[in-house]
Amino acid sequence: MREWLGRVGARTLYIEPESPWENGYIESFNGKLRDELPDKEIFYTLLDVRVLTERYRRT
């Protein structure tokens, strides 16, 4: 991926994990997801995780 980005002249930015001051929107989403989704659902298969996570994301 880095090689391809270099060839097309793009650069990546490093965002420190769990750094809400660097990417507040996604950190807020991830925090809410961790707090709410596992407490409300039981996952039996990977498909369950995908479907329920997408449903949660859309709401």
Image (tube, rainbow, N blue to C red):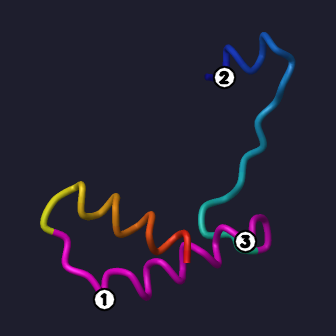
Q: Is residue 58 left or right of residue 55?
A: right
In the picture of the structure, the residue carrying the numbered disc 2 is 2
| Callout 3 crowding tier (Cα within 10 Å): few <14, some 14–19, many ≥20 | few
Q: Are marks 2 and 1 in contact (CB under 8 Å)?
A: no
In the picture of the structure, the residue carrying the numbered disc 3 is 25
Q: Amino acid at mark 1?
A: Lys
User: Which sits earlier in the primary sequence, circle 3 or circle 2?
Assistant: 2
Instruction: Give the extent of the magenta segment.
Output: 21-43
Q: Is residue 24 left or right of residue 47?
A: right
Name the spot of residue 26 as percent of width and height, x first. Answer: 66, 67
Separation of marks 3 and 2 at Cα, in angstroms = 25 Å
Separation of marks 2 and 1 at Cα, in angstroms = 38 Å
In the picture of the structure, the residue carrying the numbered disc 1 is 40
37 in magenta? yes
Tag of residue 3: none
Where, by quadrant of the figure, is residue 45 drawn?
Answer: bottom left
Please tell me whether residue 1 is drawn above or below residue 8 in the rendered image. below
